[in-house]
Image: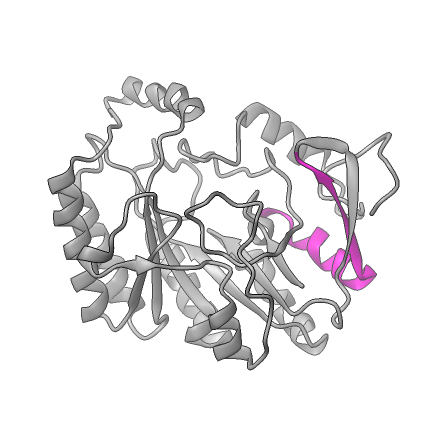
Amino acid sequence: MIVSASRRTDIPAFYSTWFMNRIREGFCLVPNPFNPKQVSRISLAPDDVDCIVFWTRDPRPLLPHLAALDAGGYRYYFLFTLLHNPRAIDPFSPSVNTSIDTFKRLSDRIGHRKVVWRYDPILLSTATEVPFHKQSFSFIAENLRGSTVRCIISLATLYRKLRRRLTCLEENGIRVREPEDQEIAELMLYLAAAAKENEMEILSCAQERSLDAFGILPGKCVDDALIREVFGIEVSHRKDPSQRKPCGCVESRDIGAYDTCMFGCVYCYATSDFDKARANYRAHDPEGASLVRITNFQCPM
């Protein structure tokens, strides 16, 4: 079993204490996002966990616990989101220089193949046009050279529920828009060249539109081939049926919860209500079996 920690929230940044408590207990409870009364019990025992995939913008709170994970025999790698957006778009993320320093420290600690850089999602707006992303990507790539061998990118999907939130950026003079075909071609060709120059493989994440023509092949964030290459083990090759069609990830069990991340990124699909996220964070019990409080639930499966 692969444990995803987590597409739904940033466990390393905000819930490391809870996560390590659950590691010590050997299990956690996870409510079904669409039916909170239905709760699954997920084993976190070393013999049951093939690999843990950490998704994060700031792994610093988890770094002191890596020795304990290693001692417990856990295998893991990190998907590290590192962008350089204006504060109006990413209000509470660490600064780009802080993130680069953290990325390097993590890579030095666990190895450059176990830290994957996500420049994702790419949002085009009046504050983040194509030249902005060219400069931003190049700056980060040059600084991460030697600290990773893979970068995953995607163009932001402007879901209907996000469009309403994104209009609030107009108060700051920022208008978000869909990219034009020629802009996509220009930017993708540039990113592919910059990645190659800095000795990185570049892949796309869950793109409806093929980027193959620009030298960017579809990738997997939860990647069976990467796990085999890095850890020398075989895991399920089955595509995760719970993810949307363009997603190439293999199946995993996600132990996070929606509406619990505190970074406040305006384009985030996993946070529908920032006030709700803050309330859930305040109510969080690091000693609890579940990341969020659950009541009146069915017997764990």
Q: Is residue 100 left or right of residue 34?
A: left
Q: So how many labels did they put on this image?
A: 0
Residue at x 23% of width, y 22% of height: 173
Q: Magenta residues, as a range?
A: 14-33
Which quarter of the rendering shows the N terminus? bottom right
Query: Quadrant of residue 194 in the image?
Result: bottom left
Residue at x 38% of width, y 38% of height: 90
Vertical relation: 147 (above or below) 164: below
Residue 24 colored in magenta in the image: yes
Residue 57 colored in magenta in the image: no
Vertical relation: 129 (above or below) 167: below
Vertical relation: 166 (above or below) 61: above
Please provide percent x and percent y for residue 71.
Answer: 70, 78
Please provide percent x and percent y for residue 166.
Answer: 36, 24
Residue found at the very far bottom of the displayed protein: 232
Please name whichever residue, 83 or 229, is drawn nearer the observer in this view of the structure: 229
Please provide percent x and percent y for residue 195.
Answer: 23, 64
